[in-house]
Amino acid sequence: MLREPFVDEKFEPDLMWFIGGFNVYDREETRGVELGVYDPDNKADRESLIRGYCLNLDCLSYRHKFVLVEFLAEKLSDSNFDFQTLFEIDEGIASSWPREEWYGLESPRQFFQDVYELAQEVWREDLLLACAEDQTLW
């Protein structure tokens, strides 16, 4: 069974792995400033964000990456899945996005579609390695 990277529990794929690095709560003066120059609705900026932050997950093994990409593909194939809910933050939660645009992206689905497409490129070798294995043995 595939285990979580930091705790000894079963790994459950979650799309927050892709966008959690954009949380700037209590880091507004550092990470917030760093990310504040990007517009997530701008395609070129979005690609830079995805390459630099969404797919820069060194703590994950090639198997974790494979499972996350498969999970994302499943969500993208569901036309009713609401990607905007991933960007909504309750007031009682200690989280915040770097810019106001993050709270209401023009197309959160397109953001994740771009994550999927770039993951196929950036993680290509990892995904091929995992695909060649029998996932039932993980």
Image: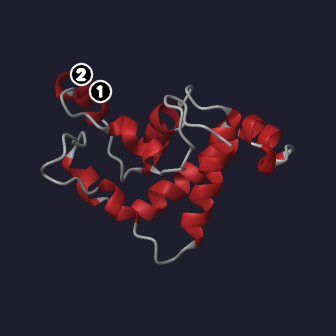
User: Considering depth in this image, is 4 or 103 the residue closer to the camera?
Assistant: 4
Secondary structure category for the residue under label 2: helix
Type of the residue with mark 1: Glu
44 left or right of 130? left
Q: Name the spot of residue 74 as percent of width and height, x first.
A: 60, 65
Q: Report the residue at 54% width, 53% height from top.
A: 114
Marks 2 and 1, how far apart in space? 6 Å
Type of the residue with mark 2: Thr
Position of the N terminus by quadrant: top right
Position of the C terminus by quadrant: top right
Q: Quadrant of residue 72?
A: bottom right
Q: Quadrant of residue 105?
A: bottom left
31 left or right of 110? left
Q: Report the residue at 47% width, 42% height from top.
A: 17
Q: Name the spot of residue 115 as percent of width and height, x first.
A: 54, 49
Task: Say whether marks 2 and 1 touch (CB < 8 Å).
Answer: yes
Q: Is residue 90 above or below residue 22?
A: below
Q: Name the spot of residue 135 as percent of width and height, x first.
A: 78, 48
Q: Report the residue at 17% width, 23% height from top.
A: 29
Q: Name the spot of residue 122 as percent of width and height, x first.
A: 65, 37
Q: Report the residue at 40% width, 69% height from top.
A: 82
Q: Residues within 10 Å of mark 2 (few under 14, many from 20)?
A: few
Which residue does the numbered mark 1 point to in the structure image? Answer: 34
104 left or right of 62? left
Q: In this view of the protein, can residue 85 be seen by the observer? A: yes
Q: Is residue 130 above or below residue 58?
A: below
Q: Residue furthest bottom?
A: 80
Which residue does the numbered mark 2 point to in the structure image? Answer: 30
Q: Which mark is residue 107?
A: none
Q: Residue furthest front?
A: 8
Q: Residues within 10 Å of mark 1 (few under 14, many from 20)?
A: few
Secondary structure category for the residue under label 1: helix
